[in-house]
Amino acid sequence: MIRASIIGVSGYTGEELLKLLSRHQNVQIAGLYGRPSSEPRNLKDMYPRFENLNLQIEPLNIEKIKKTSDVVFLALPHAVAFETVPQLLNAGLKVIDLSADFRLKNSEIYEKWYKVTHSAKEYLEQAVYAIPELNADLIKTASLIANPGCYPTTVALSCAPAIKSGAVDLEGIIIDSKSGISGAGRNAAKEYFDNEHPNFRAYKIGGAHRHIPEIEQELSLLCGKPVTVIFTPHIMPVERGMFSTIYVNLTQKITTEQIIAIYKEFYKEKHFVKILEGSALPAIKDVVNTNYCRIALKVDERANKLIIVCVIDNLVKGAAGQAVQNMNIMFGFQETQGLE
């Protein structure tokens, strides 16, 4: 049994983390924390669904966390973890950070995109960017996990097998992604449902979205050369779910059946990635409230392109579920525990 604390439980991701961890047979919830200046409150007052947990949300107390926790999940806004993470690591705790603060290996790129000074850049080298299906060996020995963003998760899982097989060239890759409004946070979701729903729109187009450097970093690592992407995100009129369609140039003549076989072999021992066969296509409803990623593939012979369709739940595989999956690997638990 390990002791887990969550810092930042009031948002969508924090709530999802608590739901998953509270039903994990090898986890004891050690503490729930807000900002240092926040007032204590009963968990059931914020989330009546958790009334049986009988827990309080306390102001952030690093000394208490050090004494009572084995692993700490940070579900905080960007640039908030710089002071907290070093203190926890130096106390020998394992840390899973769900913000972008330790995802980008180049602090100058982080500062350019997030418009803040990175004050914990000496910890970037030890942070493991953790997509379990792609780098489980590194996760096993990690102390600091940089939990990936939701959009980059769909892109990396969608492209990795094709890149590793040599079947595609990432020059001119186009990524068209849609997210449920929960990806923008609780306040933005409330405003959307109050004023816009059921609107559907693009946002931050033309290379403006902060997930772009994360996507480009991971694709560049996969293919061994710099990659520039065209990435257009959209907001869907649903609370949760993510749908990415990716267009990649082929380097060889290959059939849809052959590329499906490549993907099935690549992910044959990866429980949470499902490759669809034939003409089947995934839908958001297939993955909502699960940690699964479902991928479909189609070769467009006329355009000599591979079309990849990928769906996940942005709050589970795109955030809290992947964080728990990473925790399971770090502590030697069965990868699916707490996630089925």
Image: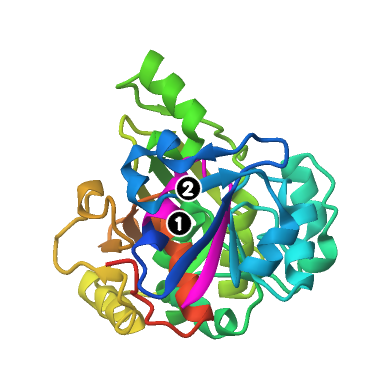
Residue 325 lies in the magenta stretch: no
Q: Amino acid at mark 1?
A: Ala
The tag on residue 13 is 2
In front of the other: 296 or 331: 331
Give the total of numbered labels.
2
Residue 198: quarter of image? top left
Above/below status of 146 relative to 284: below
> CB atoms at circles 2 and 1 under 8 Å apart?
yes
Q: Counting other residues with Cα less than 10 Å from the Cα at mark 1, is it few (<14), some (14-19), or many (20 or more)?
A: many
Q: Amino acid at mark 2?
A: Thr
Q: Is residue 238 visible?
A: yes
Q: Is residue 241 visible?
A: no
Q: Earlier in the sequence, mark 2 or mark 1?
A: 2
Residue at the image point whose x is 20% and y is 67% from the top: 276
Q: Counting other residues with Cα less than 10 Å from the Cα at mark 2, is it few (<14), some (14-19), or many (20 or more)?
A: many
Region of the chain picked out in magenta, as a range: 1-19
Which residue appears farthest toward the front when viewing the image? Answer: 54
The residue under label 1 is 320
**Residue 81 in the image, given as x and y percentages of width and height:** 72, 52
Residue at the image point whose x is 35% and y is 26% from the top: 200
**Residue 105 in the image, given as x and y percentages of width and height:** 73, 64
